[in-house]
């Protein structure tokens, strides 16, 4: 199938990581016929990716760039335009999360990088690439957000969540403004995936994305396997292609279906407990699930309990409901207690700050 990508020029940020989304996206675009410009602060990684693109028979350039620095980005874009004449596709992929810590404990200096690398960088790179797209009235911009904005957010990674949420609102605002110029702007929200950012991340000697976090995530997904870096490439290439010409302002969750309605409580429970260093994600799932079922439970117990009490004077269902409420209440109290615990007590943080 011809995706209309032959001889297009793409710029992918953060494609230096050899186990990240950016490299998978860059190589897949090259396989579809694109020349690809890589910008990354990791210049060795960027050059390695560029070499693999050239081995596929396409042209590539690699630049050492900090994407939070507008003059470095502008210089690289200028050099890329001098070589290729245009940039048709921009993939704003570079990003990172600061170590998880309760919102009230985290200092401004500690959370500034979340905003800088995940939000400011997208504004800088988009601004640098946009003028020539506007001139040609053609372009595709793909922003990498995160599914934390919907399914995994918690107070330990609040700044990362805010930055990725802003990437989505920016995507919608840009899409609305740039639609008349035939520039499509969309976002991808990956789920927790095994990349450099997650694998082997150790904080204070503790593996952040440990087996329990992976297991809790995989079991909450609709597709029960771990996300791998190449899982984003197909969606990115689709959004870069002519096939998506009528698609703009959208966010696509590429997270193995971690979306379930009614299951959200289980997911939240598992993640809240996981992020609270609890070794009991299964308990979290059960309690989260019970919590989600509360409104249905209330209706059920009122109906059945009311009927039995009315007819035979039996009050068992009301007692059961009371016990369930007490257990749920105690669980919520314990989670709240952990969420507000001082940072130094968090020796085993396992939150999903992807
Ligand atoms: N891995 C996940 O589970 C996951 C989930 C949701 C969203 N994301 C997002 O996907 C994107 C890619 O993440 P990844 O998991 O492939 O991470 P990764 O660490 O493998 O790759 C990130 C790349 O960005 C580069 N980078 C970081 N800061 C930079 C800077 N200031 N200037 C230039 N380059 C910089 C790094 O050098 C690296 O090559 C990020 O935006 C991340 O927030 C990742």
Image (cartoon, grey):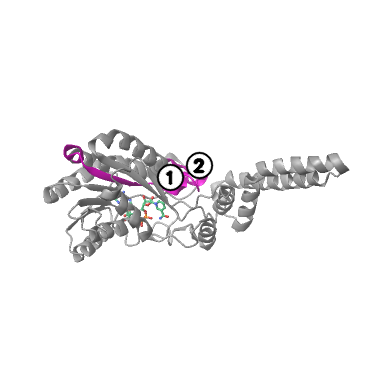
User: Does residue 66 appear in the picture of this structure?
Assistant: no
Q: Residue at x 38, y 37 (%)?
A: 169
Q: Which numbered circle lies on residue 74?
A: none
Please give the residue where the numbered disc 1 appears in the rendered image.
160
Front residue of this view, candidates 53 and 202: 53
Range of magenta residues:
133-162
| 160 in the magenta segment | yes
- The Cα–Cα distance between marks 2 and 1, rounded to whole angstroms, is 11 Å
Please give the residue where the numbered disc 2 appears in the rendered image.
103
Q: In this view, does 312 lie to the left or right of 284?
A: right
Q: How many residues crowd around disc 2 within 10 Å: few (fewer than 14), some, or many (20 or more)? A: some
Q: In x, y percent, where is residue 125?
A: 26, 43
Q: What element carries label 2?
A: loop
Q: In x, y percent, where is residue 192?
A: 45, 55
Front residue of this view, candidates 235 and 64: 235
| 96 in the magenta segment | no
Q: How many residues crowd around disc 1 within 10 Å: few (fewer than 14), some, or many (20 or more)? A: many
Q: Which residue is drawn at 71% across and 48% down?
A: 327
Q: Is mark 1 on a helix, strand or loop?
A: helix
Label 2 vs label 1, nearer the camera: 1
Q: Is mark 1 within 8 Å of ligand 1?
A: yes
Q: In which quarter of the image is residue 282?
A: bottom right
Q: Is mark 2 within 8 Å of ligand 1?
A: no
Front residue of this view, candidates 258 and 271: 258
Q: In x, y percent, where is residue 346?
A: 55, 52
Q: Quadrant of the N terminus?
A: bottom left
Front residue of this view, candidates 51 and 181: 181
Marked residue nearer the N-terminal end (2 or 1): 2
Q: Are marks 2 and 1 in contact (CB under 8 Å)?
A: no
């Amino acid at each position: 199938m011809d995706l209309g990508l032959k001889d297009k020029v793409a710029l992918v940020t953060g494609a230096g990581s050899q186990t990240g989304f950016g490299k998978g996206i860059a190589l897949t675009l090259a396989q579809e016929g694109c020349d690809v410009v890589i910008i990354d602060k990791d210049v060795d990684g960027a050059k390695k990716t560029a070499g693999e693109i050239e081995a596929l028979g396409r042209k590539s350039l690699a630049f050492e760039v900090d994407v939070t620095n507008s003059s470095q980005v502008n210089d690289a874009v200028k050099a890329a335009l001098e070589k290729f004449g245009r940039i048709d596709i921009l993939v704003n992929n570079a990003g990172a999360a600061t170590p998880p810590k309760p919102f009230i404990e985290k200092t401004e200096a500690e959370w500034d990088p979340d905003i800088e690398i995940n939000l400011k960088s997208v504004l800088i790179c988009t601004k640098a690439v946009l003028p020539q797209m506007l001139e040609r009235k053609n372009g595709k911009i793909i922003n990498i957000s995160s599914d934390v904005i919907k399914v995994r957010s918690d107070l330990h990674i609040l700044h990362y969540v805010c930055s990725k949420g802003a990437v989505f609102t920016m995507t919608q605002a840009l899409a609305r403004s740039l639609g008349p110029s035939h520039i499509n702007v969309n976002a991808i929200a990956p789920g927790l995936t095994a990349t450099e950012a997650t694998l082997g991340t150790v904080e204070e000697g503790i593996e952040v994305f440990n087996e329990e976090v992976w297991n809790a995530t995989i079991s909450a997904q609709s597709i029960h396997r771990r996300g791998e870096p190449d899982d984003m490439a197909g969606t990115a290439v689709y959004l870069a292609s002519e096939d998506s010409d009528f698609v703009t302002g959208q966010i696509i969750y590429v997270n193995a279906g971690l979306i379930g309605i009614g299951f959200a409580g289980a997911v939240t429970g598992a993640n809240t407990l996981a992020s609270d260093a609890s070794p009991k994600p299964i308990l979290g799932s059960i309690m989260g699930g019970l919590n989600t079922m509360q409104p249905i439970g209330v209706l059920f117990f009122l109906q059945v309990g009311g009927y039995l009490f009315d007819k035979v004077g039996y009050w068992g269902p009301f007692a059961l409901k009371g016990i369930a409420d007490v257990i749920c209440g105690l669980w919520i109290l314990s989670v709240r207690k952990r969420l507000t615990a001082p940072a130094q007590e968090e020796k085993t943080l396992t939150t999903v700050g992807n």
